[in-house]
Image: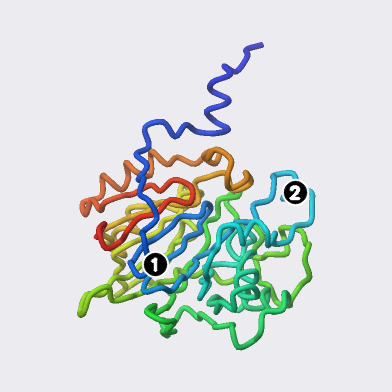
Amino acid sequence: MQLVPRRTLQQRLSPSLDGVPFHREPRPGDDQQLALQWLGTAGFRLQFQGKHLWLDPHMSRHSLAELAFGRIAPVPARVLAQVDAADGVLVGHSHFDHAMDAPVLANHFGAQVYGAEDTLTYCRGLGVPEAQLHLLAGDDAVHTLGPFAIGARRSTHSPFALGRVPYPGHITKPFQVPARTSAWRVGQTLIPHVTLEPAPGRRVTVAHVGSAALIDAELRGLRADVVLACTIGRHATANFTHRLLDALSPKLVVPCHWDQFWRPIDAPVRQIPSNDLAGFLQEVAAHPSAPRVRVLPMLGWISLADAL
Ligand SMILES: [Zn+2]
């Protein structure tokens, strides 16, 4: 019998973040500036001109045991501890770790919700008024929210679970919480994008790729200055990083969905087993366009006006 060396096992369960160059920057002094905050998982806040748009916010963060065996529900106290203002919530697909907290922001702050029908159906079940629900059909129709022009392209979800998409199918009717994680079916996966104008005539587009997959043809004609890129599950999508950079030609890439989202938001950040953030950074560096990459620490900020 051979014992597995302890370090190797630990490495596999939580690949080291040693050597990852984290970008550390204080929150901008005022929320007029164009800035981005990472919230863990695939969650971000985009702020500009005093407006706050949240992308796949997931702050409820249940334990692995709760996710595997329990029934889960949004935890408003955990969410509201991180949210001081919310004008909109943009959701890329309706898995629990992307869509779960949208109704909290909608109900508490009156935030507008933008997502596929699956996400809107889930929000209806949690009492979000119809007037706050806006369908993203993936047809590039533009919704205006303050300085943000919001659209989406159709995408697909990484088949990372032994070649399959976890919880496939749609949310066809509202459901009550707490519910099993499987209640949050993947639904229509989107790549939402947000365009704003930080200076007259200067437009900046941010694309949110919340699952490591894409449909190249659906991204035709879309360019994104900033790509928020999911890294977990990318090995299940052939040539994901290269194709994504080919399709969107970003100047800046911010990786996401690499942290263990079943740990509390204030616990030390650990990488998801089997995720390979260092490998992703190498793939980006090897792309001919060699965009800048900024890895944000948990709840960390980056001023986009400076970064672009
Ligand atoms: Zn997902």
Q: Is residue 245 above or below residue 19?
A: below
Question: Where does label 1 land, which residue?
Answer: 31
Rendered location of residue 181, percent (x, y): 71, 58
Q: Is residue 291 left or right of residue 136?
A: left
- Label 2: which secondary element: helix
- Say which residue appears at 32% left-offset and 41% top-offset: 282
> Where, by quadrant of the figure, is residue 168 drawn?
bottom right
Q: In this view, does 44 lie to the left or right of 179?
A: left
Name the quadrant of the N terminus: top right
Residue nearest the viewer, comparing 105 with 26: 26
Q: Which mark is residue 66?
A: 2
Q: What amino acid is found at the position of numbered circle 2 in the picture?
A: Glu
> Where, by quadrant of the figure, is residue 130 drawn?
bottom right
Rendered location of residue 305, percent (x, y): 27, 63
Rendered-image quarter of ligand 1 = bottom right
The mark nearer the N terminus, 1 or 2, is 1
- Say which residue appears at 79% left-offset and 56% top-offset: 71
Residue nearest the viewer, comparing 104 with 225: 104
Rendered location of residue 267, percent (x, y): 58, 40
Q: Residues within 10 Å of mark 2 (few under 14, many from 20)?
A: some
View extreme (bottom): residue: 131
